[in-house]
Amino acid sequence: MSQGLMFLFLKPRAERPPIDQIILRLQKSIGSIPGITAVLTPQPVLQISVGATSQTQGQYAYTISGIVPQDVYDVANQLLKKLQQFKGFASVRSDYYHDTPNLRIDINRDRAATYGVSTSAIQSLMRNAYSQNYVYLIKEPDDQYQVILEVKDKDRAHPGDLDDLYVRSSTSGNFSASGSGGGTIATTTGSMTNLVPLRVVTSTKEVIGPQAVNHLNQFTSVTFNFNLLPNVAIGDATKYIEDAFAQIHPNYPTVQGIFQGETLVFQQLFRSLPLLLLAAIFVMYVILGILYESYVHPFTVLFPAIVPAVVGGLATLYLFHSVLSLYSVIGLFLLLGIVKKNGIMVVDFALQRIDEGWDLRSAIHEASMERFRPIMMTTLAALMGAIPIALGFGQDAASRRPLGLVIVGGLIFSQLITLFVTPVIYLWLEWFQEHVLDKVPFLRSAHYHDEAGPGREQLRPEPAGVH
């Protein structure tokens, strides 16, 4: 089968329809040509190419493999029909082409054993004759060259050319030669190596079969490559494929399926996403705990900021009908680092006032009023930087837009909640610290004051006004 690769350079964004519409239009036009299978894929800024897939075959891939080749091919035919029924695929194809002329070579093992020819010797002969495998590497100071052992093109064009191949057989015995008079002339006895014609120990048959026998982990495999339509989530596509394969699998228990390439990366990413979020929050908790020398103050900083930010970011994606992509996950982790500074500003200022002798309520009220302007300035700075990404400015803005939506939505929602919730949570946790944790010396806060000490309930200065 012949293949070709073509690059299309589009006009500026203002002079053309969206790239998704162009792909759909070209896909329908090219797909109407008999004998041609086209895969149209926009080149992303963030490209992941691993496993058994490449961008020229399709952005995503699913591979089935098994011990019995015919079972794998039967499952491939049934699964392809089911995948073509899914309306979210822009294109779907497989690397299994079963109508290609093949020449099957069968080894007569009994006859090969009689002539002292091993199966590995026959396989080595075929590999050296047809696989274009290099047998030696010549290295020079300025370059290196591969020595390729193969049969000439004119001597391997027809099935009958196999009759000219000889396989080596190790035997020992007497050398003999027939003289011109018909007599036999005995010669030296010793070990010798004979060349046996390949046609003596093998048989050939022309059949119709697959164009190539692909393997995954040494098992026969078939790979399905597919692209998604706009606004179709990869999670919906993977679930459909898994359900379709589950319907076929009971009849072929030896066949297994696994996602490859970018799909596998997404599966692993989203499977480990909760653990990654918890690990990031735990690291922030440890750092803040060391900074404030307290077990509860990190909760005061993290809880009022992170929970509304995550909820707001995901809700924004849902409202704008965007998908949770790799860019969205990056934006989510970036959002965690941005929003926690609001709580840090308030709590840090309140702790300074408490160390000066202020009571809790006055200290947190003063901190909220004094740090309101810096909090708004830093939040607006981050917000203004993310709005162009969320609005979709730029030639390749569609892929980056989820990142901007997560940041903008998370910042706005977290800002509205944090300013009002942080003081309340701070007072609750301080009460818990004083009445429970401070009773245990190991859990006592560094800002602990003896209840009989001066100033805790006596200093109640007027809260500062907004300047």
Image (spheres, rainbow, N blue to C red):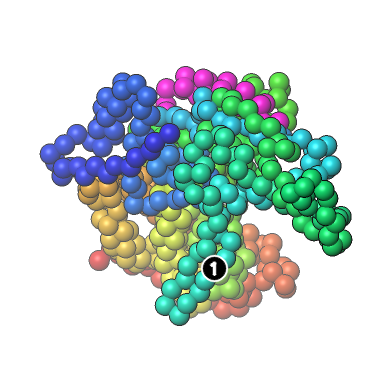
Query: Is residue 338 part of the magenta span, yes or no?
Result: no
Mark 1 residue crowding within 10 angstroms, few (<14) / some (14–19) / many (20+): few
Query: Is residue 69 part of the magenta span, yes or no?
Result: yes
Q: What percent of the width, then of the height, locates residue 102?
A: 56, 30
Q: What percent of the width, then of the height, locates residue 136?
A: 57, 65
Which residue occupies the foreground of this view, 366 or 217? 217
Considering only vertical position in the picture, is 149 above or below 358? above
Which residue occupies the foreground of this view, 178 or 83? 178
Q: Quadrant of the C terminus?
A: bottom left
- Residue that carries the numbered disc 1 in the rendered image: 137
Residue at image x 52%, y 58%?
148
Query: Going by the image, does 185 lie left or right of 394?
Result: right
Mark 1: amino acid: Leu
Q: What percent of the width, then of the height, locates residue 438?
A: 68, 68
Q: What percent of the width, then of the height, locates residue 335?
A: 42, 55
- Per the rendered image, the range of residues in magenta is 68-89
Residue at image x 19%, y 34%?
17
